[in-house]
């Protein structure tokens, strides 16, 4: 018993010092993305506000739920998938955002909701290793991505249930882009079945790069930023923007966050034109602030999903938020079959 | 190695075990009880989570995969670890210390780094396939990752120390004179191994096998990276349910089934071992 009360005292002391020292916790997915968020969002924020930003990660939806339920929320701002954010907002896991502090007039309306604003957005694009497809026609369309006769070899896709691969399968099967939703899951899985034995799943950006660069999977569907990073490293990478599918990450504040005010101010800074432009310059992901592109160099802007709106499909985040569980259960069961 | 399990010592010293027991109560027993209660209350009260898990071919296959992989890993680990432990026991102690350091060093390296290393080695364009092709053993790269082969190789490598250490502890205590006696009595080398050495080493094999099997049952990182989704194991299912789908009822039910199986195996081993000790 004595030990328990001792622990309790220690926890209270820690919590108190955290509140006094003007600091907050930002949680994201780690890797180069979080490095850039630290450099271009957190550092300028700390300089302006005097509030230190502690970095934590990786983002874990189970942890957010556990923290909110236990009333002990250690994370103030979290980078999540946008469809999850919409669902979690409805489920009561998030604080409504304070748009008195965050200027939403300047933000891309595709990525603004009561509980979440975009963190950055990206496109799923077809990437391939040109060495494997030299001479022949190079893969261009989603149909090519699913055509193992014309373009032999393993293909790599995002492992987790999320917007992107289902849409790609339907497009490859001939569904017109404007009739994707509501998603015909039966048709999508049937299409995926045709190449199932050729699929290698990637779980994170680094793995997707490794699979492509090594030639293990000479073709696949990737986050555009990861391909841009490979190109920046001097790797020859083929990219097709045909039917690129956009999805976004979101910034959210878990319900009951300890430093709510600091959290809102942090989000305001992170979504400001300059912070978004700097982040995009570094990562190849697109800014969600409408004023950011004009702050970026022209040749860089050309590599962003922003410049590819002609063949672009916006994954329907509201649809995904509503059907996330249903699709997820089917997705994982299908994978394990 | 397992002398603390002998009946004479059990029961006494409970007071000294109190801090550890309290810690386990607060940070293990209570959360597990919470998880169990969620599995029968979320999303609605009842046993439907268990019905779904045990009534679907897909989920049953995941459980089957889990036992298949764990069993394979245990078997192969034992086959490799036995000669290693035996060699360690009869080596000059200075050499043995170096070999031990090598074995333990691998345990101190980050698990993720080790698993990625295997991924790079085993993939179709990896070192193993390239050597096999260069030497003309194969013409086409062999599929060594994203399947059962990859998971098994990766996990055997990670589990080896957990088998070698208890085996070494037991074998080291076997008096070499016993084997000489067996030879003097006319036993061939094979007979000495089967009828003398193996029976004496059984407690080590049993405790090593139990540890490896139980750890394998709950393994996540290695199966996730080196196995395909068709070889999914229960830990991955639990992670999906808890982290991605926030379906804690289902995750709890899967975890509870795994826990029951593990405890049953532990009870069985304890029983067998006690029978031997008496």
Image: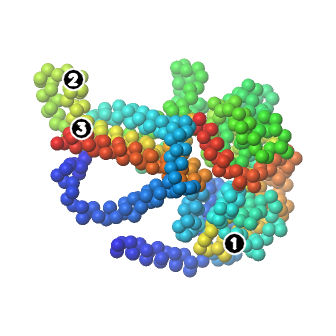
Q: Nearer the viewer, mark 2 or mark 3?
A: 2
Q: Position of residue A143 (x, y in %)?
A: 78, 34
Q: Does A274 sit left or right of B142 as displayed? A: right
Vertical relation: B164 (above or below) A102? above
Vertical relation: B246 (above or below) B15? above
Task: Name the outermost residue toward the front.
Answer: B46
Q: Which residue is mark 2?
A: B191
Q: Which of the numbered marks, if any, corresponds to residue A304? A: none
Q: Does B80 sit left or right of A183 as displayed? A: left
| Residue at x-position 72% and y-position 51% | A320
Q: How far is mark 3 from mark 1, CA to CA?
A: 63 Å
Q: Quadrant of the N terminus of chain A?
A: bottom left
Q: Which residue is mark 1?
A: A264
Quick check: do tags 2 and 3 share a chain? yes
Q: Which of the numbered marks, if any, corresponds to residue B171? A: 3
Callout 1 crowding tier (Cα within 10 Å): few <14, some 14–19, many ≥20 = many
Q: How is the image coloured?
A: rainbow
Q: Is label 1 in a helix, a strand or a loop?
A: helix
Badge 2 sits on which subunit?
B
Q: How far is mark 1 from mark 2, CA to CA?
A: 76 Å
Task: Name the outermost residue toward the bottom.
Answer: A20
Q: Nearer the viewer, residue A298 or A50?
A: A50
Q: Nearer the viewer, mark 3 or mark 1?
A: 1
Q: Quadrant of residue B91?
A: top left
Q: Quadrant of residue B189?
A: top left
Quick check: do tags 3 and 1 share a chain? no
Q: Is label 3 in a helix, a strand or a loop?
A: helix
Q: Does A194 sit left or right of B230 as displayed? A: right
| Residue at x-position 55% and y-position 65% | A69
Badge 1 sits on which subunit?
A
Q: Position of residue A78 (x, y in %)?
A: 64, 63
């Amino acid at each position: 018993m004595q030990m328990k009360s001792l622990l309790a005292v220690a926890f209270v002391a820690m919590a108190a010092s955290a509140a006094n020292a003007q600091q907050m916790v930002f949680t994201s997915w780690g890797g180069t993305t979080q490095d850039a968020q630290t450099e271009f969002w957190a550092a300028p924020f700390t300089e302006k506000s005097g509030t230190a930003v502690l970095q934590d990660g990786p983002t874990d939806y189970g942890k957010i739920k556990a923290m909110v339920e236990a009333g002990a929320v250690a994370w103030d701002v979290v980078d999540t998938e946008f469809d999850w954010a919409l669902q979690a907002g409805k489920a009561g896991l998030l604080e409504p955002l304070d748009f008195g502090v965050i200027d939403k007039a300047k933000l891309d309306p595709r990525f603004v909701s009561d509980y979440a604003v975009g963190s950055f957005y990206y496109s799923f694009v077809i990437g391939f290793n040109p060495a494997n497809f030299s001479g022949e026609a190079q893969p261009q369309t989603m149909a090519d991505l699913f055509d193992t006769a014309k373009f032999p070899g393993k293909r790599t896709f995002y492992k987790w249930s999320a917007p992107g691969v289902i849409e790609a399968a339907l497009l490859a099967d001939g569904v017109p882009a404007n009739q994707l939703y509501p998603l015909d899951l039966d048709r999508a899985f049937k299409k995926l079945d045709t190449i199932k034995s050729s699929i290698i799943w990637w779980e994170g950006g680094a793995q997707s790069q490794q699979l492509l660069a090594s030639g293990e999977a000479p073709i696949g569907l990737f986050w555009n930023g990861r391909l841009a990073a490979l190109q920046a490293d001097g790797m020859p990478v083929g990219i097709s923007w045909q039917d690129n599918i956009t999805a976004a990450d979101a910034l959210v504040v878990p319900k009951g966050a300890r430093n709510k005010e600091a959290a809102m101010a942090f989000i305001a800074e992170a979504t400001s034109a300059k912070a978004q432009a700097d982040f995009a310059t570094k990562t190849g992901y697109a800014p969600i602030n409408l004023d950011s592109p004009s702050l970026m160099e022209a040749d860089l802007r050309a590599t962003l999903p922003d410049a590819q709106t002609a063949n672009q499909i916006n994954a329907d985040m509201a649809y995904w938020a509503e059907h996330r569980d249903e699709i997820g259960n089917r997705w994982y069961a299908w994978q394990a079959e | 190695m397992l002398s603390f399990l002998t009946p004479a010592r059990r029961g006494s010293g409970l007071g000294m075990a109190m801090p550890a027991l309290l810690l386990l109560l607060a940070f293990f027993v209570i959360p597990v009880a919470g998880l169990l209660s969620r599995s029968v209350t979320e999303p609605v009260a009842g046993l439907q989570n268990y019905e779904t898990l045990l009534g679907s071919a897909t989920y049953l296959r995941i459980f089957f995969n889990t036992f298949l992989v764990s069993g394979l890993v245990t078997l192969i680990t034992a086959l490799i670890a036995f000669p290693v432990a035996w060699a360690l026991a009869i080596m000059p102690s200075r050499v043995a210390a170096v070999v031990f350091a090598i074995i333990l060093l691998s345990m101190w390296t980050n698990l993720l780094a080790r698993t990625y290393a295997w991924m790079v080695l085993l993939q179709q364009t990896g070192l193993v396939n390239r050597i096999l092709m260069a030497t003309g053993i194969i013409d086409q790269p062999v599929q060594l990752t994203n399947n059962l082969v990859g998971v098994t190789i990766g996990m055997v490598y990670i589990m080896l120390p957990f088998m070698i250490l208890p085996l070494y502890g037991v074998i080291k205590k076997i008096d070499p004179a016993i084997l000489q006696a067996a030879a003097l009595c006319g036993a061939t080398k094979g007979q000495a191994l089967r009828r003398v050495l193996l029976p004496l080493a059984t407690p080590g094999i049993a405790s090593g096998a139990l540890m490896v099997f139980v750890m394998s049952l709950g393994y996540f990182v290695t199966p996730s990276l080196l196995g395909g989704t068709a070889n999914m194991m229960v830990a991955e299912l639990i992670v999906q349910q808890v982290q991605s789908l926030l379906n804690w009822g289902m995750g709890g039910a899967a975890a509870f089934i795994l826990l029951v199986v593990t405890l049953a195996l532990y009870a069985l081993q304890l029983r067998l071992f006690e029978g031997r000790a008496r």
